[in-house]
Amino acid sequence: MIKTGKYRHFKGNEYEVLFVAKHSETLEEMVVYRALYGEGGVWVRPAAMWEEEIERDGKRFKRFEYIGD
């Protein structure tokens, strides 16, 4: 389950999860989040993508790591 709060992307930027919502047509879970840098844009991404692990330079990382409220 994806909690609301702050997360760090594997590339270093921080984001805040505002809500977990459902796509109106497919019912796919979507994460609604905002950037905690720059203009603070609000974005949406499939929950499955939010939670996935990625591989870079032979190492595996969570795409987003929970860092607190």
Image (tube, rainbow, N blue to C red):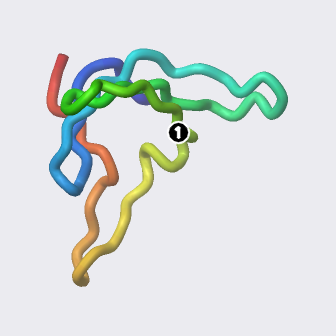
Residue 55 rendering spot, x and y as whole percentages: 33, 73
Residue 4 rendering spot, x and y as whole percentages: 34, 18
- In the rendered image, the residue lying farthest to the front is 39
Q: Quadrant of residue 66?
A: top left
Compare residues 37 and 60 and report the one nearer the observer. Answer: 37
Quadrant of the rendering where the C terminus is positioned: top left
Q: Label 1 sits on what residue type?
A: Arg
The residue at which mark 1 appears reads as 45
- In the rendered image, the residue lying farthest to the bottom is 58
Q: Measured along the vertical axis of the image, is residue 43 above or below residue 3? A: below
- In the rendered image, the residue lying farthest to the right is 25
The residue under the point 25% across, 47% down is: 9
Q: Measured along the vertical axis of the image, is residue 21 above or below residue 53? A: above
Task: Using a 10 Å C-alpha cutoff, classify the residue at mark 1 as few (fewer than 14 neighbours), some (14 to 19) or many (20 or more).
Answer: few
Q: Quadrant of residue 10?
A: bottom left
Q: Is residue 46 left or right of residue 19?
A: right
Residue 28 rendering spot, x and y as whole percentages: 70, 34
Q: Quadrant of residue 22?
A: top right
Q: Is residue 62 left or right of residue 36?
A: right
Q: Measured along the vertical axis of the image, is residue 12 above or below residue 1? A: below
The residue under the point 30% across, 54% down is: 62
Q: Measured along the vertical axis of the image, is residue 53 above or below residue 37? A: below
Q: Secondary structure at mark 1?
A: strand
Residue 50 rendering spot, x and y as whole percentages: 44, 44
The residue under the point 47% across, 31% down is: 43
